[in-house]
């Protein structure tokens, strides 16, 4: 007996369904962050198992770590210093903000960028309760001092 197509789709969480713009933004942000490779490790789509729960940020940033090519890790347990979440077309903003307040910040993540493709904006939330929004110009992350040219991301 065949499984109906809609049953297969329902197995995925809304954040797991990629779109063209979602994928494009993850790529562009990752490329822009590559200039910080000497100082930070940039990991797209890394599975995390933090003390506060499992999650998979679109991009996470860690201070530079040594590589161990012989022993890989499926669920990394250390919180990143910074996480980037790109809003998916079928995802509610509250899904992301809940993840930020219930998983990321309690686990020790310092900043989270929420990227909203349709509005071409990035909102930065900090673990100490500060917020700022960038729609154009240079965005500077307060925890890492990483800078991002939003006009490059949304070109």
Image (cartoon, grey):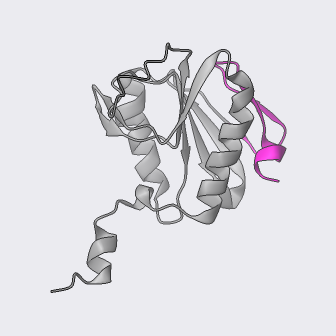
Residue depicted at 49% across the width and 13% down the height:
66
Q: Position of residue 19 (x, y in %)?
A: 56, 64
Q: Quadrant of residue 124?
A: top right
Looking at the image, is 11 positioned above or below residue 150?
Answer: below
**Residue lying farthest bottom?**
1
In this view, the residue in front, 27 or 116, is: 27
Residue depicted at 33% across the width and 62% down the height:
12
Does the rendering let one see residue 125? yes
**Residue lying farthest front?**
70
In this view, the residue in front, 95 or 47, is: 47
In this view, the residue in front, 60 or 124, is: 60
Does the rendering let one see residue 143? no
Query: Is residue 136 found inside the magenta-colored segment of the image?
Result: yes
Q: Position of residue 59 (x, y in %)?
A: 54, 38
Quick check: 69 left or right of 42?
left
Q: Position of residue 50 (x, y in %)?
A: 32, 28
Which of the image's four quarters has the N terminus? bottom left
Q: Position of residue 15 (x, y in %)?
A: 43, 56
Query: Is residue 66 found inside the magenta-colored segment of the image?
Result: no
Residue depicted at 21% across the width and 85% down the height:
2
Looking at the image, is 19 positioned above or below residue 121?
Answer: below
Quick check: 87 left or right of 134?
left
Where does the magenta region start and end? 133-155
Looking at the image, is 60 positioned above or below residue 116?
Answer: above
Looking at the image, is 86 positioned above or below residue 60?
Answer: below
Q: Quadrant of residue 37?
A: top right
Total label count?
0
């Amino acid at each position: 007996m065949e499984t109906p197509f809609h049953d297969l789709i329902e197995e995925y969480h809304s954040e797991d369904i990629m779109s063209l713009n979602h994928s494009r933004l993850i790529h562009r942000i990752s490329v822009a962050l590559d200039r910080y490779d000497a100082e930070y490790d940039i990991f797209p789509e890394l599975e995390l198992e933090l003390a506060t729960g499992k999650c998979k940020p679109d991009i996470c940033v860690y201070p530079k770590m040594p590589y161990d090519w012989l022993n890989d890790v499926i669920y990394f347990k250390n919180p990143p210093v910074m996480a980037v979440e790109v809003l998916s077309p079928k995802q509610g903003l509250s899904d992301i903000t809940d993840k930020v307040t219930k998983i990321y910040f309690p686990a020790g993540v310092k900043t989270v960028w929420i990227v909203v493709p349709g509005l071409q904006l990035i909102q930065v939330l900090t673990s100490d309760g500060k917020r700022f929004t960038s729609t154009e110009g240079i965005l500077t992350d307060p925890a890492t001092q990483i800078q991002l040219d939003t006009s490059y991301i949304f070109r």
